[in-house]
């Protein structure tokens, strides 16, 4: 996959930031409006997949390398777990309790509110987006013919 | 009532699309038709009062169509895809379908009428979430409050399942590559 | 009536899984069964003229109990949709491996080659 025509490349170059920004917006507003970590993560993955399809492997590696996306995937999973364990280590608190809500409640209907819900949303968004992108990159770069010839 | 009629026609569209998917010869057309079915499902979710699900469904359908096209393109298009595993004649199939619906008819009658709130008839957790969710979490989106506060353990399990599927896909596709590196080193 | 159509959609997916020979069609049929089950859960959650369970600024929170649809199946299905995408991607990865090992998507030929 060496990339597509110049028209597709130009359009992809123009709209990649908008798609990524829309995904981040949906993740951050997840506790106020429809959306959340799952929807926003899939849209973030869409923006990187579009770059991979339009430009090919070398340019997509520059945006987000495969190793980096795998690391971010693991970071998202561990961040969800740590946010759950945060409440577990405090006294009188169950697993996944909303600790931040008691110390820093914020005002309702603003972005900084609802305690740790936006943080878990962000972790899920990172996890889902980079996980799907990792699967897609490994599917798109699978070239068994070359490997069999080398063997 | 309008919602019910709209959902009825969209479901008919989805069933016709599924028949096309099952019987069409070209694999690429089948994949594109699957995308159309998914968008119909997204509209149904929007009509049923679930905008979160509609957004997720659209994005998921786009990515799954892209992945399936990546899998099918340049491969196997010439092979006839419509041959079934065994030649099932239509009359026994129709008899089977008739008896199936005859036997599940009592179960269908036990289902609640469409549009009746089943969750209010007894003390369910949905009532608790709807009544106290905003006060307890401060999040106006009750669905978000449920998946990230009341039932965050489910979300952790979902993250683990997705992580496992990523690891599985990577290990399936990288097996030969890794073995070669091991031999080289 | 709508429940019956949803069950028919599920049965069409089951028919595709059982009868079709092409792996890509089996994957599409499994995704359709997933969609049908999700749709059935959301259909059970609906209330006539119900609104989405999301508050606007200035709305009384107690009004949700009288006008909103059931939020719990939505929360369960929301994770299920994304898991379905992960499962589809895993199956596509398996299908590509099988294609490059045997040169076909036809499961009967794969069985014959395996012996």
Image (cartoon, grey):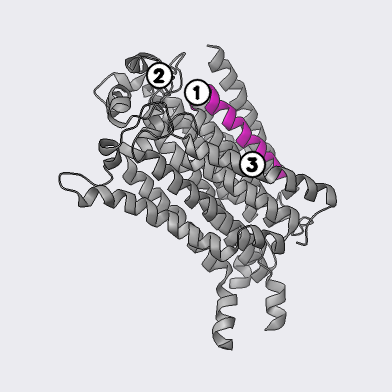
Q: Is residue C31 above or below residue A68?
A: above
Given this view, does label 1 or label 2 mark the residue nearer the observer?
2
| Label disc, if present, on residue A19 of the rendered structure | 3
Chain bearing tag 3 is: A
**Spot occupied by residue C53 in the image (x, y as percentages of width and height):** 42, 23
- Identify which residue, A116 or B1, lies in the foreground: A116
Q: Nearer the viewer, residue A19 or B50?
A: A19
Of helix, strand and loop, which one carries label 2? loop
Q: Which residue is mark 2?
A: C68
Image point 34% across, 21% down: which residue?
Answer: B118
Which residue has dot 1 on it?
Answer: B48
CB within 8 Å, label 1 to label 3 = no
Q: Which residues are magenta?
A: B29-50
- Inspect this view and state whether residue C16 appears: no
Foreground disc of the pair 1, 3? 3
Picture residue at 52% right of the left edge, 55% below the top: A131
Packing grade of label 3 (10 A; few <14, some 14-19, many >=20) is some
Q: Percent position (x, y) of residue B34?
A: 65, 41
């Amino acid at each position: 996959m060496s990339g597509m025509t110049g028209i597709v490349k130009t359009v992809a170059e123009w709209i990649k930031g908008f798609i990524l920004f829309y995904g981040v917006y949906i993740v951050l507003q997840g506790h106020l409006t429809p959306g959340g970590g799952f929807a926003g993560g899939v849209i973030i993955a869409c923006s990187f997949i579009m770059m991979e399809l339009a430009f090919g492997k070398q340019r997509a590696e520059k945006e987000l390398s495969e190793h980096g996306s795998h690391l971010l995937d693991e970071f998202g999973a561990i961040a969800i777990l740590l946010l759950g364990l945060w409440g577990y280590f405090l006294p009188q608190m169950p697993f996944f309790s909303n600790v931040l809500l008691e110390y820093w409640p914020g005002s309702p209907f603003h972005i900084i509110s609802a305690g740790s819900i936006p943080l878990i949303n962000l972790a899920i968004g990172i996890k889902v987006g980079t996980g799907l992108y990792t699967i897609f990159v490994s599917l798109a770069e699978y070239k068994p013919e070359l490997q069999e010839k080398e063997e | 009532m309008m919602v019910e009629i709209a959902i009825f026609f969209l479901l008919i569209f989805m069933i016709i699309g599924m028949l096309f998917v099952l019987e069409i010869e070209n694999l690429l057309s089948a994949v594109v038709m699957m995308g159309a079915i998914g968008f119909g499902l997204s509209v149904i979710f929007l009509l049923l009062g679930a905008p979160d699900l509609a957004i997720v469904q659209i994005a998921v359908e786009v990515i799954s169509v892209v992945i399936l096209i990546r899998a099918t393109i340049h491969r196997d298009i010439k092979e006839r895809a419509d041959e079934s595993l065994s030649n099932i004649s239509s009359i026994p199939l129709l008899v089977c379908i008739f008896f199936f619906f005859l036997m599940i008819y009592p179960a269908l009658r036990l289902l609640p009428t469409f549009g009746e709130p089943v969750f209010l008839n007894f003390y369910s957790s949905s009532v608790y979430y709807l009544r106290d969710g905003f006060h307890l979490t401060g999040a106006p989106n009750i669905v978000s409050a449920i998946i990230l506060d009341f039932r965050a353990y489910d979300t952790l399990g979902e993250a683990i399942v997705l992580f496992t599927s990523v690891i599985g896909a990577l290990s399936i596709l990288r097996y030969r590559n890794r073995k070669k590196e091991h031999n080289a080193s | 009536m709508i429940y019956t159509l949803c069950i028919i959609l599920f049965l069409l997916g089951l028919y595709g899984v059982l009868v079709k020979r092409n792996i890509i069609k089996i994957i599409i049929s499994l995704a359709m069964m997933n969609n049908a089950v999700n749709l059935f859960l959301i259909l059970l959650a609906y209330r006539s003229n119900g609104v989405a369970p999301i508050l606007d600024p200035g709305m009384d929170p107690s009004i949700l109990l009288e006008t909103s649809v059931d939020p719990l199946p939505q929360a369960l299905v929301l994770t299920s949709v994304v898991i379905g995408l992960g499962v589809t991607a895993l199956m596509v990865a398996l299908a590509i491996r099988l294609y490059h090992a045997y040169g076909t998507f036809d499961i009967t030929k794969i069985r014959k080659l395996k012996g």
